[in-house]
């Protein structure tokens, strides 16, 4: 298990977000990204979760609640053996969940190597 402080974990999430190309990051709309310790009431192995309406499925009109991307600290730390692997897996998870915001399916992400 690779354990790092919450602050270091959040820094790794921010670094992963910083690595997203500017044009894609700027296209993200009405989404909040949070770190939680565990997936409450869900599969305890869940690494991240996208909750919302993908940009490709939105219709103009009334206000939407913000989409939400959650990165789960506990499962990520448990699956990794060292800090380098953990930081890499955090980046993969962030990209995976951000891709869902853009309407990219799990199958397509797996095909692209971001599963």
Image: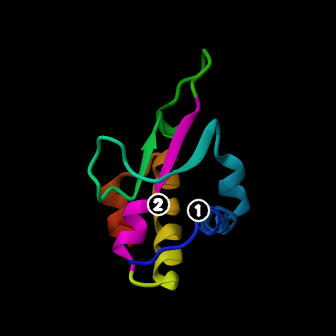
Q: Nearer the viewer, mark 2 or mark 1?
A: 1
Q: Is residue 70 magenta?
A: yes
Which of marks 1 and 2 precedes in the sequence? 1
Question: In the rendering, at what x and y percent does residue 101 appear?
Answer: 51, 45
Whether pointer 2 and pointer 1 mark residues with C-beta atoms closer than 8 Å, the reply is yes
Q: Give residue 6's mark.
A: 1
Question: In the rendering, at what x and y percent does residue 61 appear?
Answer: 60, 16
Q: Give residue 73's mark.
A: 2
Mark 1 is surrounded, within 10 Å at the Cα level, by few (under 14), some (14 to 19) or many (20 or more) other residues, namely few
Question: In the rendering, at what x and y percent does residue 51 appear?
Answer: 44, 38
Q: Is residue 96 above or below residue 67?
A: below
Q: Residue at x 41, y 66 (%)?
A: 76
Which image quadrant: the N terminus? bottom left
Q: Is residue 73 magenta?
A: yes
Q: Is residue 104 left or right of residue 7?
A: left
Identify which residue, 91 or 23, lies in the foreground.
91
Snapshot quadrant of residue 9? bottom right
Q: Is residue 23 left or right of residue 37?
A: right
Q: Is residue 16 above or below residue 39?
A: below
Question: In the rendering, at what x and y percent does residue 24 appear?
Answer: 65, 56
Q: Is residue 93 above or below residue 104?
A: below
């Amino acid at each position: 298990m690779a354990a790092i402080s919450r602050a270091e974990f959040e820094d790794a999430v921010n670094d992963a977000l910083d690595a997203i190309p500017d044009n894609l990051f700027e296209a993200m709309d009405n989404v909040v990204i949070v770190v939680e310790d565990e997936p409450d009431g869900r599969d305890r192995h869940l690494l991240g979760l996208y909750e919302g309406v993908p940009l490709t499925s939105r219709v103009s009109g009334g206000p939407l609640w913000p989409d939400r991307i959650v990165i789960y600290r506990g499962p990520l730390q448990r699956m990794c053996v060292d800090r380098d692997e953990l930081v890499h897996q955090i980046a993969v998870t962030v990209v995976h969940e951000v891709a869902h915001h853009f309407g990219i399916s799990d199958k397509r992400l797996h095909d692209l190597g971001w599963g």
